Image (tube, rainbow, N blue to C red):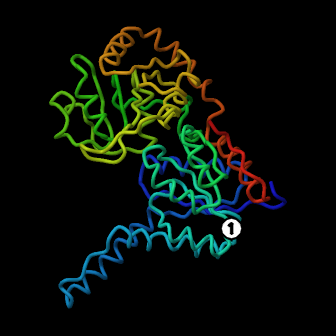
Amino acid sequence: MMGHRLRVLLAHPGASWATADVFWGLFHGLKYHDVDVIPYRLDHRFEDARAALHYRWRRIKKTEPNAQPPNPADLSYHASIGALEMALRRHVDVVLVVSGMLLHPDVLIMMKQAGLRVVVLFTESPYDHASEMKVAAIVDGGWTNERSVVSAFRTVNPHFGYLPHAWNPLVHRTDLPIDDSVPAHDVVFVGTSFRERVRWFNSIDWTGINFGLYGSWDKAKLNTHVRACVRGGPIDNERAVLLYRRAKIGLNLYRTSQGWGPHAPSITHAESLNPRAYELAACGTFFLSDHRQESTEVFGETVPMFRSPVEAAALIRRWLADEAGRARMAAALPARVAEASWIHRAKMVLGDLQQLLTGAVMTARSA
């Protein structure tokens, strides 16, 4: 690409799922294009930092009873600082940070002071926009998963563009065997219990519907019928795919809350697809979705959309009764996202990196 094999330090987001799937998808995509990818496992580093700092705190507390335990910033710094050493020792061309919300900002600053090129792929726009803007001002450039906020990022850093989410060709496929031991639901959803989703599921009459709800859910906030549909805790992408391929209908609900708790503010606008939309389509699973502008552009009529639980409930029962219609719509979905894999997205990333490393302005797609 640039006269030699590009060497990238790819920094893990630190979380165990969701953003971690972005990391592994991009890792595969970059490796496919013969990039020398060096992973920095921030998730593992957090485990090590937590064990070491709490061990030291317990020892100190024996002689200093008022000693304070390590706080989140302490853990973040100790988990992150090794990325600087690794990048310098391995002589990388660029550090690519996925998400960037858990990597300590001081480490990013020191990377820049050391002469390293640093870019970030934001995965939580527009929900964590304020925090992402602070990181964007530090790094050399990057991408956001939400096209409507590209212009805002460019007010603090002109080297920002839009990189849509994607699906992983190692995981999201229609040709892998279907596991008959996996539950076959009428309707399935895999995700996290943001408050708006709790309200949404509690508003649906699930009588007579075999509904499976997977992910991290507080059962105390769910009504009795929905609570009975919860199936364990968070699951990995591989398990989610098996559930999608066995379900009659997949559900895609977009997050709107910024943060957690009953009083978390809501976003005012978003347009872009989330990973779940790409993954369901790549698996050839018929699905229903709440409204996003980009969904209409990508899927057209193949993904029926709703704007309220009342509309969704009617769509669920209408499509459960139409097996031939579901099969027809599902068969059309993989082609709609054929060029939206992490292999394709990695090619976009490499094109932008070439411009950045040669001194040109990054021209990633914008809204």
209 vs 123: above or below? above
The quarter of the image holding the C terminus is top right
Q: Is 11 left, or right, of 77 in this rendering?
A: right
Q: Is residue 274 visible?
A: yes
Say which quarter of the image contains residue 15. bottom left
Whole-percent x, y for residue 68 in the image = 25, 78
Q: Is 165 left, or right, of 178 in this rendering?
A: right
Q: Secondary structure at mark 1?
A: loop
> Residue lying farthest front?
155
Kindly identify which residue carries mark 1: 92
200 vs 220: above or below? above
Residue at left offset 26%, top offset 42%: 217
Q: Nearer the viewer, residue 248 or 344?
A: 344
Residue at left offset 35%, top offset 41%: 257
Q: Amino acid at mark 1?
A: Val
Residue at left offset 22%, top offset 30%: 226
Q: Nearer the viewer, residue 159 or 166?
A: 159
How many numbered marks are there? Answer: 1
Q: Is 242 left, or right, of 8 in this rendering?
A: left
Q: Is residue 166 visible?
A: no
The quarter of the image holding the N terminus is bottom right
Whole-percent x, y for residue 253 in the image = 39, 31
Whole-percent x, y for residue 134 in the image = 50, 58
108 vs 259: above or below? below
Whole-percent x, y for residue 206 in the image = 24, 21
> Residue lying farthest bottom?
63
Q: Nearer the viewer, residue 163 or 79?
A: 163
Dot 1, how many residues are within 10 Å of its Cα: few (below 14), some (14-19), or many (20+)?
A: some
347 vs 205: above or below? below
